[in-house]
Amino acid sequence: VIKDNIATRDLPTTAGSRLLEGYRAPGDATAVERARRGGAVVVAKANLDEFGMGSSNENSGFGPVKNPWDAERVPGGSSGGSAAAVAAGLAPLALGTDTGGSVRQPAAFCGVVGVKPTYGRVSRSGLVAFASSLDTIGPISRDVAGAAAVLSVIAGRDPLDATSSERGVDDYARAAQESVPGVRVGLPEEYLGDGLEEPVRQAVLDAARALEDAGASVTRVGMPHTGYGVAAYHVLADAEASSNLARYDGIRYGAAPADARDEDDLVVRTRTEGFGEEVKRRIVLGTFALSAGYRDRYYLTAQRVRSLIAADFDAAFSACEVLLTPVTPGTAFRLGERADDPLSMYLSDVFTAPTSLAGVPAASVPWSVAGDGLPVGVQLVAPRFDEAVLFRAAAALERVAPFRDASPALGSDEGSRDGGST
């Protein structure tokens, strides 16, 4: 299953927007082309928050996605369709995109594995751009081995993407089979503070003990600029979005009204009628951050914060080889619960946005099922281009996770605490 902001030659690519309804790309994205070459069969495109902007998959022009564990809950966003499809057993593998947590958060909410590779590890050619310095394509699967296999196939240098790296691709499948004795694991203090629901906190601490039992060492590390991550992320991502989405004017791209009076009316009506409310909000915020008199105050300040956050990760990785953190502050929230509270929605990315700003690889691994019957995932973070250690640690957790035999109780509005059949 391919998230619908990734181009496919034989299926429409709408990015979840009515503005692109029916649009067909001239060819496959590089990641899709490589997946097909590796033996993948594309069975469907997956719904998403419009243009990848959202944390709940309620912002799609084609309606919301529901969580297979509880149809009254969100699946997470923006790759909610991809994660829900894998969790529901509709396909064993999916591609999603992650700009500030959009693979990892849905993976945590739906009880599947989701990987955000290092920025530049996978080509962005054929990806509908949201924030070009942050966008990544990554795999979603039922297990770590599946994600490792997919990333091995789609990763690598692509001449069609100048930001793709020339560094060689490791054997991730083999890495997922290796044990973790001697691996140093860092537990960031700032990720375990206020606002974290107890089932999530407990999952992280239990996962840390499990890694110790498997032979790894665990140490506390500091990430002092973590608290600025969400704010910096939204300034930078929204600024880039306001630039990238300028192409949707009804002339170059976009379904234009047939009765427009003139060119100005055509552009205004195309965007007013075509873009959803969340996309409009982010375009306005991003344009403001880049406007005269405010660019230094907001955009350049956010770039400086981004550098400080990246330095936090570099410092942490001098003391450890992989970090263990929460993915989200809590389990999947109810549909509509945060629809009128954008700030609360944005804070869903508090633990994922910093890794995106730093460009480092990260993975969400299912760990347990909370008392409300919903999955709880934990996040592993590794140094740039060291996805191999990420898969080693992820596989070690998967082997001992209480979640191992759990699955959603499909056909019911309530998830299964004790597991069920798919």
Image (spheres, rainbow, N blue to C red):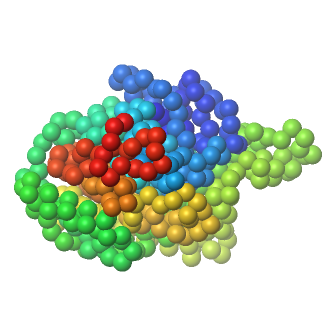
State which quadrant residue 193 falls in: bottom left
State which quadrant residue 144 falls in: top left
Q: Is residue 25 above or below residue 274?
A: above
Q: Is residue 334 above or below residue 387?
A: below
The quarter of the image holding the C terminus is: top left
Which residue is located at x 55 percent, y 41 percent? 47
Front residue of this view, candidates 216 and 120: 216
Residue 185 position in % (x across, y down): 17, 61
Front residue of this view, candidates 346 and 361: 346
Left or right for 315, reference 248: left
How many numbered circles are shown? 0
- Find the residue positioned furthest to the right: 261
Residue 356 position in % (x across, y down): 40, 57
Left or right for 119, reference 4: left
Which residue is located at x 73 percent, y 47 percent? 274
Q: Is residue 192 visible?
A: yes
Q: Is residue 100 above or below residue 303?
A: above
Residue 263 position in % (x across, y down): 86, 46
Which residue is located at x 39 percent, y 28 percent? 35
Q: Is residue 125 visible?
A: no
Which residue is located at x 61 percent, y 30 percent? 12
Residue 210 position in % (x across, y down): 14, 57
